[in-house]
Image (cartoon, rainbow, N blue to C red):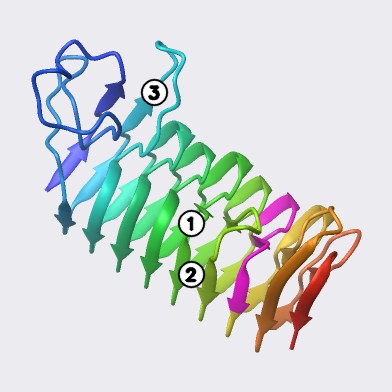
């Protein structure tokens, strides 16, 4: 099952007639003479070149392919959102691939859970080239980029955990692979930052972070300050 070239504008004239969400390029409203069904579970689906935009109404838009739900064994390619989650927003995703998705924040997804997924060449204007404020386990992240948190970002206030993940060749200005997250059993190879934290950064404010980086391997990461890890703040453990 494939969803190709769906565009969602929040100014759909049909939105009051359908029992659907206001967001998600492939999961809601009629617009531009296309009909997109609501998905609670997406299994073995391809989402290609879907988009959601709030520019016409001056509102934010999220979830270029899916807004809330579950996705298993799916592929998300070149989906976009004006605001958050280029492909997915608040979605539980397993055994799926995210390729070249784009958003202002959370290039591939924002919020939710990713398990056994591949994220490659996703990008965000601001933060979280692949993921923003979502948990990730047994995932691979390659060649993702953003201004902060080339692969994964959280603002430090969210309880986000990253476990058993591989990060290769991600880049950002701050935190080439990750910014702020709790990290365990991960491997970081050849990630880079133009300012600080080639693999991992805790940001530039001297705050209480309550972060722990545990049992991780760092190889070939680079930045002007903190080639592997930049740990600024209080209550940060790297063990």
In-front residue for pair 137/182: 182
Decide which of tag 2 and tag 3 comes sooner along the chain.
3
Q: Quadrant of residue 138?
A: bottom left
Q: How would you rate the neighbour count of disc 3 (Cα within 10 Å): few for under 14, some for 14-19, many for 20 or more? A: many
Residue 112, how many percent across, how many down?
39, 57
Closest to the camera, between mark 1 and mark 3, is 3
Do the CB atoms of the residues marked 2 and 3 lie less than 8 Å apart? Answer: no
Q: Which residue is mark 3?
A: 53
Is residue 239 something that shows in the picture?
yes
Residue 124, how many percent across, how many down?
57, 41
Give left or right: position of 18 versus 208: left
183, above or below 114, in the image = below
Say how many tags the image has: 3
Q: Quadrant of residue 80?
A: top left
Which label belongs to residue 120?
1
Which label belongs to residue 140?
2
Residue 151, how many percent across, how many down?
58, 57
99, above or below 21, in the image = below
């Amino acid at each position: 099952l494939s969803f190709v070239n769906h565009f969602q504008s929040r100014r759909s004239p049909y939105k009051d007639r359908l029992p659907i969400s206001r967001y998600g390029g492939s999961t809601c409203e009629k617009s531009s003479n296309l009909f997109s069904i609501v998905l609670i579970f997406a299994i073995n689906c391809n989402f290609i070149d879907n988009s959601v935009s709030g520019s016409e109404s001056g509102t934010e838009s999220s979830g270029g392919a899916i807004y809330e739900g579950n996705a298993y064994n799916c592929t998300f390619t070149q989906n976009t959102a004006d605001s958050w989650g280029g492909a997915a927003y608040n979605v539980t995703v397993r055994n799926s691939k995210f390729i070249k998705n784009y958003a202002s924040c959370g290039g591939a997804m924002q919020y939710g859970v990713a398990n056994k997924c591949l994220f490659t060449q996703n990008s965000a204007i601001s933060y979280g080239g692949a993921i923003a404020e979502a948990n990730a386990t047994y995932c691979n992240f390659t060649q993702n980029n953003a201004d902060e948190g080339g692969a994964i970002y959280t603002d430090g206030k969210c309880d986000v955990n990253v476990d058993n993940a591989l990060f290769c060749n991600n880049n950002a200005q701050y935190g080439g692979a990750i910014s702020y997250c709790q990290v365990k059993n991960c491997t970081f190879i050849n990630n880079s930052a133009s300012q600080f934290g080639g693999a991992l950064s805790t940001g530039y404010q001297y705050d209480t972070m309550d972060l722990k980086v545990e049992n991780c391997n760092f190889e070939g990461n680079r930045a002007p300050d903190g080639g592997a890890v930049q740990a600024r703040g209080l209550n940060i453990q790297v063990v």
